[in-house]
């Protein structure tokens, strides 16, 4: 390059900046992207497609930009948020002034307390650790248990959290309200009631009931509640959907 | 030609040509000084953008467009539960930082005598001015946060707000709820009272009963198979160092995704 280069400004011997102005041969960024291969190429093609998708959506005749005539963020919305926040913080302060925590005795490994409990929000998890009576004794192993009771409890926890985590992949579709999906509302109700009954199971020595009966109830009661929820929502469904549709059709009469 | 360097645009001359009040000239001098070093003008566009975002009017929501408020107003408090858990997290963080000035996670004996950790909590409760209230605020805001987080999850479940395209945020939420519970658990152990000790005992046993990696987990989280000083120290560092950073970052992502995707409104 330096042989026939007449431009004195450009030096490639290391003394200059080394930055050369783009000429006609320099590929544009677009050309560079089009020349890529493999995953980079796929990414480029996908992004081009989605950009076109957005463009098409905007050019569709029935596409309307949303109204922006509503509640101003500042100061109205912010003032409301501030008021709600201070009210809420005030509630916490009031609660903590009214009900200060107690202080139990120092740790003592030689003296097991009558009641061992975590905080209330872990009762459900603690209850799942006490399901050893449901750990099956498999006859093929000569009445042995496949896994220890403690491991059974830990796995019960993993199963519960895992089920909650995959709910969005099990329940698809556009239904949102409980009345539109009575089954999943019933599943939710069963879960909520089960979390309460299993918490009751974890404090079983505080509950005036035989432990066998309590165990049975802690599984039966949630199911009963779920069934009732399902029946109630199925009954409500017609009337509720009718009201809702009427509201929509008043605003947008069917053509 | 003088050897003195001169400003290309002679900002100083421009300042002197204007009749400025003291306040204005102090302001401009500071601005010039900073701009010469950081070139703030390059970022003005960002600031401007922010300004207009702050003054933006909220778009009409679905419920407003279809005039559904009279149908839905009683659901709205449930839509504040996410904010409530964030607010109580902030309250807990502030009160916790103040508690950290007085608490020492040391000398965790378990023979019924008061250890340093236990005594520092007693000092906070008994002798420190308003210390009782401070610990109470920390404890109650933690309880309220857990309650709000649980109710927030129920709201999201029963309004179907976890559906496409919000599955990722639901899973992040599960991670956050678990982190909240771990936060509560580690904090529960810190006073090293009877309740703390036996809750810790259950934790070690749970960790040990995990197949294959149980012993490793017990070592990592509890610093051994029995409760000792290192258990308390690990719980402390988890509670005041690891969990705050991790949880705050994930909360930011969680809220950021809600911002990007918009609230799943009732319909």
Image (cartoon, rainbow, N blue to C red):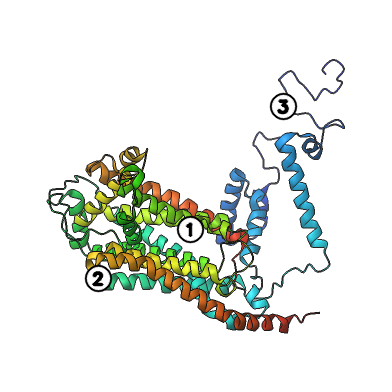
- Name which residue lies at 75% across and 29% down: A19
Which of the 4 image quarters holds residue B54?
A: bottom right
Asked whether B231 or A136 is in front, the reply is A136
Q: Quadrant of the C terminus of chain B?
A: bottom right
- Name which residue lies at 69% across and 75% down: A69
Residue assigned mark 2: A209
> Helix or strand or loop: what does disc 3 sit on?
loop
Most distant residue in the top direction: A3
Asked whether B157 or A79 is in front, the reply is B157
In the image, residue B241 sits, relative to residue A192, either above or below, namely: above
Q: Where residue A47 sits in the image (x, y, percent)?
A: 74, 47
- Name which residue lies at 19% across and 44% down: B107
Residue assigned mark 1: A164
Q: Are marks 1 and 2 in contact (CB under 8 Å)?
A: no
**Of the image marks 3 and 1, the number of the one nearer the N terminus:** 3
For the image shown, how many numbered marks are present on the structure? 3
- In this rendering, the label closer to the viewer, 3 or 1: 1
Please check whether the numbered discs 2 and 3 fall on a single chain: yes
Which of the 4 image quarters holds residue B185?
A: bottom left
**Of the image marks 2 and 3, the number of the one nearer the N terminus:** 3
In the image, residue B179 sits, relative to residue B262, either above or below, namely: above
Residue assigned mark 3: A17
Q: Where residue A11 sits in the image (x, y, percent)?
A: 77, 21
| Protein chain holding label 3 | A
- Name which residue lies at 18% across and 49% down: B116
In the image, residue A20 sits, relative to residue B244, either above or below, namely: above
Task: Sort mark 3 into few (<14), some (14-19) or many (20+) by Cα contacts within 10 Å.
Answer: few
Q: Quadrant of the N terminus of chain B?
A: top right
């Amino acid at each position: 390059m330096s042989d026939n280069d007449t431009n004195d400004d450009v030096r490639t011997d290391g003394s200059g900046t080394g930055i050369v102005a783009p000429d006609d041969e320099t590929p544009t960024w677009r050309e560079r992207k089009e020349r890529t291969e493999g995953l980079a190429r796929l990414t480029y093609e996908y992004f081009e497609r989605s950009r076109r998708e957005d463009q098409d959506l905007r050019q569709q005749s029935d596409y309307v930009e949303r109204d922006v005539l509503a509640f101003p963020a500042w100061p109205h919305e912010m003032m409301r948020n501030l008021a709600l926040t201070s009210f809420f913080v005030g509630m916490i302060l009031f609660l903590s002034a009214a009900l200060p925590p107690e202080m139990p005795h120092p740790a003592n490994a030689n003296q097991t307390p009558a009641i061992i409990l975590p905080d209330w929000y872990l009762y459900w998890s603690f209850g799942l650790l006490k399901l050893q009576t449901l750990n099956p004794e498999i006859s093929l192993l000569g009445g042995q248990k496949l896994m220890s009771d403690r491991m059974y409890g830990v796995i019960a926890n993993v199963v519960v959290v895992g089920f909650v985590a995959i709910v969005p992949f099990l329940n698809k579709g556009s239904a949102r309200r409980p009345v539109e999906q009575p089954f999943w509302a019933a599943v939710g109700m069963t879960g909520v009631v089960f979390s309460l009954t299993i918490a009751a199971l974890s404090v079983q020595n505080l509950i005036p009931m035989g432990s066998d009966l309590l165990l049975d109830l802690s599984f039966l009661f949630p199911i009963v509640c779920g069934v009732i929820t399902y029946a109630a929502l199925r009954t409500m469904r017609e009337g509720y959907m009718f009201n809702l549709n009427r509201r929509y059709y008043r605003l947008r009469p069917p053509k | 030609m003088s050897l003195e360097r001169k400003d290309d645009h002679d900002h100083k001359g421009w300042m002197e040509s204007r009749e400025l009040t003291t306040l204005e000239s102090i302001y401009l001098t500071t601005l010039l000084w900073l701009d010469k070093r950081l070139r703030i003008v390059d970022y003005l566009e960002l600031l401007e953008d922010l300004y207009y975002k702050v003054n933006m009017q909220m778009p009409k929501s679905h419920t407003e467009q279809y005039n559904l408020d009279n149908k839905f107003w009683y659901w709205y408090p449930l839509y504040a539960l996410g904010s409530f858990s964030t607010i109580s997290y902030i309250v807990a963080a502030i009160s916790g930082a103040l508690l950290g000035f007085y608490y020492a996670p040391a000398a965790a004996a378990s023979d019924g005598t008061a250890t340093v950790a236990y005594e520092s909590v007693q000092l906070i409760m008994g002798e420190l001015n308003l210390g009782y209230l401070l610990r109470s605020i920390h404890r109650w805001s933690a309880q309220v946060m857990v309650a709000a987080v649980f109710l927030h999850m129920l709201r999201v479940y029963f309004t179907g707000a976890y559906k496409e395209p919000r599955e990722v945020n639901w899973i992040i939420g599960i991670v956050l709820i678990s982190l909240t519970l771990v936060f509560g658990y580690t904090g529960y152990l810190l006073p090293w009272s009877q309740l703390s000790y036996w809750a810790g005992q259950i934790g070690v046993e749970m960790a040990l009963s995990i197949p294959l990696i149980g012993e490793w987990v017990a070592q990592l989280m509890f610093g051994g198979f029995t409760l000792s000083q290192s258990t308390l120290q690990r719980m402390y560092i988890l509670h005041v160092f690891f969990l705050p950073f991790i949880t705050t970052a994930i909360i930011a992502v969680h809220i950021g995704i809600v911002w990007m995707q918009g609230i799943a409104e009732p319909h």
